[in-house]
Image: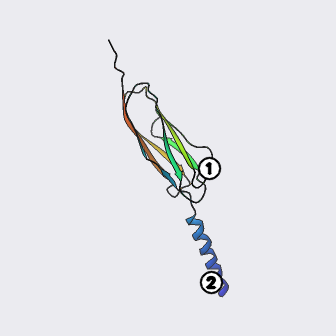
Amino acid sequence: MKSYKYIIAIVFFISYFTVSAQAEITFETDVIDYGTIKKGDDGLREFKFTNTGSTPLFITQVRSSCGCTIPKKPTDSIMPGAEEVIEVKYDTNRVGPIRKTISVSSNAVSPVVALQIKGLVEEPVEEE
């Protein structure tokens, strides 16, 4: 009977530390505001983040809500304490408001994080 108690205690101990040791993704900001920009301006921006967890972070997928926004994820694992970026390129040849969502999937405590970009793309003013 005592051996069962020891086995249960060991299983509990192992499962406790397995669950508590996880990657955690912490972004500097979850919204990037382009402000008002001109048609054809540079649409590249970066979401900076840190793995604040205790195990390596793996970004498995980064998707945009629209084909006009192209995200680029890190290809390697991000070690605890390391910083990295997710690049987002918006097609600034589309005039009008920017309101897009980028979904980041990973092995972090929160497995899906939603990031947003916003702003306004205007036609350049022609000088006479």
Residue 77 badge: 1
Q: Are marks 1 and 2 in contact (CB under 8 Å)?
A: no
Identify the residue at the far bottom of this view. 1
Place of residue 65 in the rendered image (x, y in percent of width and height, measured from the top left) = 45, 40
User: Which residue sits at x=61%, y=79%?
Assistant: 9
Picture layout, residue 75 above or below residue 125: below
User: Which residue sits at x=33%, y=14%?
Assistant: 127
Place of residue 91 in the rendered image (x, y in percent of width and height, measured from the top left) = 46, 30
Quadrant location of the N terminus in the rendered image:
bottom right
Task: State the residue in front, 61 or 77.
Answer: 77
Residue 72 visible somewhere in the drawing: yes
Task: State the residue in front, 12 or 23.
Answer: 23
Q: How many marks?
A: 2
SS of the residue under disc 2 = helix
Picture layout, residue 20 above or below residue 78: below
User: Which residue sits at x=40%, y=25%?
Assistant: 39
Place of residue 110 in the rendered image (x, y in percent of width and height, measured from the top left) = 49, 56
Tell me the kind of residue under disc 1. Ser
Place of residue 67 in the rendered image (x, y in percent of width and height, measured from the top left) = 47, 34
Q: Name the residue beneath numbered marker 2.
A: 5
SS of the residue under disc 1 = loop
Residue 98 visible somewhere in the drawing: no
Tell me the kind of residue under disc 2. Lys
Residue 38 badge: none
Quadrant location of the C terminus in the rendered image:
top left
How crowded pointer 2 is (Cα within 10 Å; few <14, some 14-19, many 20+) is rated as few
Q: Earlier in the sequence, mark 1 or mark 2?
A: 2
Identify the residue at the far left of this view. 128
Task: State the residue in front, 89 or 67.
Answer: 89
